Amino acid sequence: MDISLQVKYINNARMRVDLMRGKFFLLLLIVSGCSAVPNVEQKPSFVVPLVWQADKKTFSDKITEQWLTQFADSKLSSLVNDALTHNYDLKVASVRINAVREQAVIEGAQRLPQLSALPNYQNQHDSQNGTTKGFDALFNLSWELDVWGRIRDSQQAAGQETSAVADDYQAARLSLAARTAQSYFELIEANLQVQVAEQSIKDRRVIADLVRGRFERGLTGGLDLRLVLTDLANAEASVASSRNQVQIITRRLEVLLGRYPSGQLQENAKLPTPPNALAASLPSELLTRRPDIIAAFNRILAADSRLSSAQKALLPRLTLTASGGTSSAALTELIDPRAVAWNVAMGLLQPIFTGGRLQAIIRLNEAQKEETINHYQSTALNAFREVEQALAAEQWLRAQEKALQEAVEQTEASRQLAVYSYGQGLIQILTLLDSYRSTFTAQSEHLAVHRQLLNNRINLYLALGGGV
């Protein structure tokens, strides 16, 4: 070959080598960019105040992890423990953790060599060669070398999703405990409402007998008797409504406990005294206490890892494959290592044109990551709203409960005075009936607000991420 041609050939080869080196270093830069630590912050985008706005006091102590004990009710604690043990929705959430944990194992399995064996036996017969029998022992080995960490990122995303689902389970567990406790208090209130309504009927029957006697003696007109009997019928209808409410709440509570909704659960206790004012800790602690907020943040991390894995799918894949085996007419000869034939190959797969599929997967994961970020912001903002709302509600409910307690005492005194005044002919029947209705309404509303105060305290425990 001519010297000039040889020099030209060598220069072209050097240029190709330099070009390959440049591509290799460019590839390293791309990989380093894809492998960067994700810039994900747990701090929400909105401003978090230093103290709760509904209660300007600054608390630094931790919320109790056993808020059930604050109500000093052993029956309540027993029912909540039964619900946490037997509730089927909670069992579904528990099984879901195992499912996503195994999914993480599936994703990580791609990082390890995949080996399969193909034993075979053949029995062939033809007219020329006669019968041919033989045993085959074949194997295939494949292994993608995760040079850029694509598979590792996918496995990491599955692990982070597992953590998020585990946090979902904790949130479901707290929610179940809260709903069980609130249903328990609602059942107590419903039974007490029945007792109040039944007592109101007894009182109205006394008045009906009084008016009927006066009517028979000609001391009052028929209108008074009709009004009293109408009021008595309305009171009886109120009892029926209260009893229906008892059976609805009872069956709902039984389902929470994992029991058949037979309506046989009885609860005739009194509503406990609301616990003292709660030290609600600092607002910033909410981000690290609430399981739903932690789950939302873990899903951001998982989405970021999936995005990184999708970006690395554009890079070359290095695979190692091997296959081999042996064949013999005698089964005992298959274990002879000298009869084994095998081959090993290493390949490089570089996606060039995929119809935009890989780029679309990247954009899809970018959109999903943005979705998880906004979901995290929404979850955190809603959590702060729940705490502020519960703190504010407790103040107003306590004031309302105190006022209604005073109303109960005043209406009871006015009812007794109205009965005496009507017997003396000093007031009309409508005034007497109105005093009975006012007494019943005040007692009923006081029970309802007392129960709301207890339920709101549970909402506050739940909103602050208190454990059970």
Image: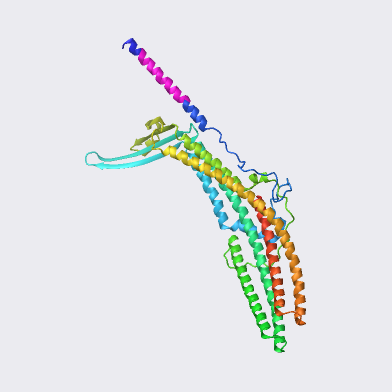
Look at the image and say whether residue 294 sits in the magenta stretch: no
Look at the image and say whether residue 16 sits in the magenta stretch: yes
**Quadrant of the image occupied by residue 41:** top right
Region of the chain picked out in magenta, as a range:
7-25
Left or right of 189? Residue 139 is: left
**Quadrant of the image occupied by residue 199:** bottom right
Asked whether residue 468 is in view, the answer is no
Question: Which residue does the image show at 38% across and 40% down from the upper left?
Answer: 119
Asked whether residue 8 is in view, the answer is yes
Residue occupying the far top of the picture: 3
Question: Which residue does the image show at 62% across and 75% down from the upper left?
Answer: 237
Residue 221: x percent and y percent?
69, 86
Q: In this view, does 67 lie above or below 139?
A: below
Nearest the camera: 183 or 340?
Answer: 183
Left or right of 341? Residue 52 is: right
Question: Which residue does the image show at 68% across and 56% down from the upper left?
Answer: 393
